[in-house]
């Protein structure tokens, strides 16, 4: 791409020109019968059912372009949606993306956003199959994801039973640590800083959990306590989390926590956007999962070492600045 082409804005390239740029010569996916270019895409649904979820990222609330590159934003948008499908025991197959941005946005930034989306989707064999592009006062990324259950029953939030084990796969507290480091202007601990910008869901583990008989499952998007509370309330059970079982998670975060001046356990229990998976299992755990608690009789609530957790409990979409959000 020559310098004149790379310097053009969205207004200069135009809606359809930009769509052509970000969809041209992209890899095909086996799950897609008709990709971008027509009035609608056609996606194979051999199972006869499709798992569907949608999510939005708003500039200044869910990401900052002075922290994240457009490529980071694209990866994050796909990753957090794929994690919702993983939490149902399914595999993400296709994404539909709506994107709004100011007319003077450099087209090269939109190219980078799309590259990030395609790069993340390729990690599990999915594709971007369509979407829309509109003018907006600031960046807004809206993603709808489709997923394949491959004949399995979906793993809901409502199936946890007393006596079952609560287990997690993926990291806890990394994104919250990264946010605190960015917000405090501390440029050390690059792994956590980057993990706040781009989560790393444990792709494939949703299917593994379903095949191992998981009774209930959710991805950790709002915070471990907050998301387990959704499971507890939906299942009508109590969930008791062990801090001893989370010691290793806290130790990994200790240096960053000391630099910021917080208790690492706060990040592990309350930090969201890691998109780890947490599930209830009646029997043996699949490889890559670790036990962190157990299910007890109701009412629906989350306990930590047998007592109600009084600390920070996780993200609130309409919370105030300082609650862990960017707003």
Image (spheres, rainbow, N blue to C red):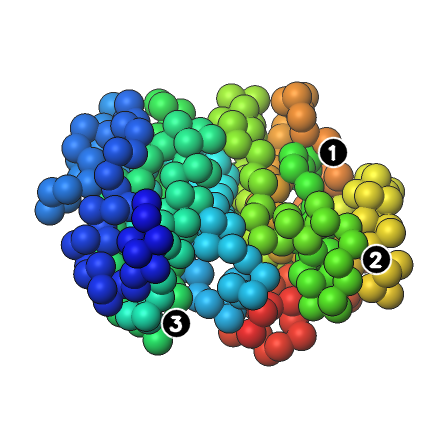
**Foreground tag (1 vs 3):** 3
Disc 2/disc 3 C-alpha distance (Å)? 33 Å
Residue 191 visible in the current orientation: yes
Disc 1/disc 2 C-alpha distance (Å)? 24 Å
In percent of width and height, residue 147 lies at 35, 35
The residue at 26%/33% (across/down) is 25
Which of disc 3 and disc 1 is earlier in sequence?
Answer: 3
Determine whether, in the image, residue 163 is placed left or right of residue 66. Answer: right
The residue at 20%/41% (across/down) is 36
In percent of width and height, residue 139 lies at 39, 66
**Foreground tag (2 vs 3):** 3
Determine whether, in the image, residue 315 is placed left or right of residue 211. Answer: right
Is the residue marked by circle 2 packed among few (<14), some (14-19), or many (20+) residues within 10 Å? Answer: many
Q: Identify the residue position indicated by label 2 in the image.
A: 257
Instruction: Give yes or no for contact between labels 1 and 3 (Cβ–Cβ under 8 Å).
Output: no
Say above or below: 216 vs 192: above
Q: Identify the residue position indicated by label 3 in the image.
A: 138
Within the image, what quadrant is residue 94 found in?
top left
Which of disc 3 and disc 2 is earlier in sequence?
Answer: 3
**Foreground tag (1 vs 2):** 2
Residue 309 visible in the current orientation: no
Name the element at disc 2: helix
Q: Residue furthest bottom?
A: 320
Q: Which mark is drawn over residue 291?
A: 1
Within the image, what quadrant is residue 127 found in?
top left
Say above or below: 175 vs 35: below
Q: Which mark is drawn over residue 128?
A: none
Instruction: Give yes or no for contact between labels 2 and 3 (Cβ–Cβ under 8 Å).
Output: no
Is the residue marked by circle 1 packed among few (<14), some (14-19), or many (20+) residues within 10 Å? Answer: some
Name the element at disc 1: strand
Quadrant for the C terminus, please.
bottom right
């Amino acid at each position: 791409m020559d310098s004149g082409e790379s310097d053009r804005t969205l207004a200069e390239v135009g809606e359809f020109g930009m769509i052509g740029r970000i969809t041209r010569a992209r890899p095909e996916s086996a799950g897609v019968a008709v990709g971008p270019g027509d009035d609608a895409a056609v996606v194979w649904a051999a199972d006869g059912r499709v798992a569907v979820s949608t999510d939005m990222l708003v500039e200044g609330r869910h990401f900052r372009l002075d922290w994240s590159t457009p490529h980071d934003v694209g990866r994050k948008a796909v990753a957090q949606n794929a994690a919702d499908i993983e939490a149902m025991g399914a595999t993400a197959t296709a994404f539909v993306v709506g994107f709004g941005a100011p007319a003077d946005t450099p087209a090269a930034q939109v190219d980078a956003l799309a590259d990030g989306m395609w790069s993340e989707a390729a990690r599990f064999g999915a594709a971007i199959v369509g979407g829309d592009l509109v003018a907006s006062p600031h960046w807004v990324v809206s993603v709808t994801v489709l997923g394949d259950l491959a004949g399995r029953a979906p793993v809901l939030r409502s199936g946890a039973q007393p006596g079952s084990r609560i287990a997690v796969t993926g990291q806890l507290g990394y994104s919250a640590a990264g946010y605190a480091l960015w917000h405090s202007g501390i440029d050390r601990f690059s792994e956590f800083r980057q993990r706040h910008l781009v989560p790393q869901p444990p792709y494939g583990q949703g299917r593994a959990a379903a095949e191992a008989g998981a009774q209930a499952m959710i991805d950790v998007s709002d915070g471990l306590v907050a998301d387990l509370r959704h499971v507890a309330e939906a299942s009508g059970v109590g969930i008791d989390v062990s801090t001893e079982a989370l010691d290793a998670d806290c130790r990994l975060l200790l240096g960053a926590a000391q630099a910021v001046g917080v208790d690492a356990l706060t990040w592990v229990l309350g930090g969201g956007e890691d998109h780890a998976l947490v599930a209830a299992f009646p029997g043996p755990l699949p490889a890559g999962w670790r036990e962190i608690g157990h299910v007890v009789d109701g009412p629906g609530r989350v306990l930590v070492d047998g007592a109600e957790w009084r600390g920070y409990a996780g993200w609130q979409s309409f919370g105030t600045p300082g609650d862990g959000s960017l707003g």
